[in-house]
Amino acid sequence: MNGLTLVQLTDTHIRPGGETVLDTVDTFATLNRVLDQLRTGGRPIDALLLTGDLADHGAPEAYRMLRAAVEPVAAELGAQVLYAMGNHDERTAFGVELLGRDQGTVDPAQPIDQVIDVAGLRIIALDSTTPGLHNGKLEDEQLDWLAAQLSRPAPRGTVLVLHHPPLPSAIAAAEVLKLQQAERLAAVVAGTDVRIILCGHNHMTAAAALAGIPVWVGPAMAYRLDAMAPAGRQRAVTGSGYSRIDVVGATVIATAVEVAAATVIYDRDEAGELDRLAPYVAHSG
């Protein structure tokens, strides 16, 4: 089977009406810049995964702006779209504006969990949010549902998405705002076909493992937290990125992609570069 490429966009923090985040960041402009890069890049993309904190304050207009920007690009790429809840999101507006549900059918007290199939790769999104709180939690019913889903292996395995990282952190804010009781999730996913767990929330790119499964905390689109701020300080800095997730055979590769403009050092033909490298590459057999 051919490989699959997923793009994770997390912590977009869209605000309506041209408002900026922290009086500094035009998050909607950043989103459109990234989408244009994806649209014009000429590379196949099989799914766009938007992994929480999609609207900064859960405003319905922000979700409408986001959907109007994302879905035409996804359609042009032939990519599926998955929206997942984050702690800045509001369930009713999220369900109505992004998922197309009727107003009266969205219960703000009930998590919005989802599953999609991308060419045999199962992608499961768990809603790790609790209204009014910023740290993460999964309910018993969600873990039971997840276990039932994972009881049947998927042809290409499973990618699990949740906003809150199920990881400890040496950064104080990330530690208090993480997924609580991550060991409960670990017990469910251990020994299953989950190949990688994708998260956002921390505004710091990171990698670790849960129950032997890789966990990738993708770079935020809105801004970054400085992971090496002076002791006793929490510092936010400009900068944004997204993640390229490649599913190649038995391997899943997560790559952080910088959004900020950078000076081009070289721009070479890919085939010609491979020819140039060929004399310096050992070949087995």
Image (tube, rainbow, N blue to C red):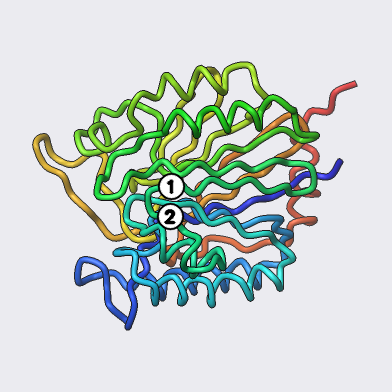
Left or right of 231 in this view: 212: right
Q: Position of residue 158 (x, y in %)?
A: 67, 35
Other residues around mark 2 within 10 Å, as few (<14) / some (14–19) / many (≥20): few
The residue positioned 44% from the left and 21% from the top of the image is 184
What's the residue at 41%, 36% (across, down)? 206
Disc number placed over residue 107 in the picture, else none? 2
What x and y, as percent, mark residue 88? Answer: 32, 56
Front position in the image: 36 or 266 = 36
Q: Quadrant of residue 72?
A: bottom right
Q: Residue at x 52, y 66 (%)?
A: 98
Residue 36 in the image: above or below residue 257: below
Residue type marked 2: Asp
Q: Quadrant of the C terminus?
A: top right
Residue designated by label 1: 110
Splitting the image into 4 quarters, where does residue 251 fall?
top right
Q: x, y (%) of residue 41?
A: 66, 67
Horizontal and vertical percent for residue 103? 47, 68
Q: What amino acid is labelled 1 in the image?
A: Gln
Residue 12 located left or right of residue 133: right
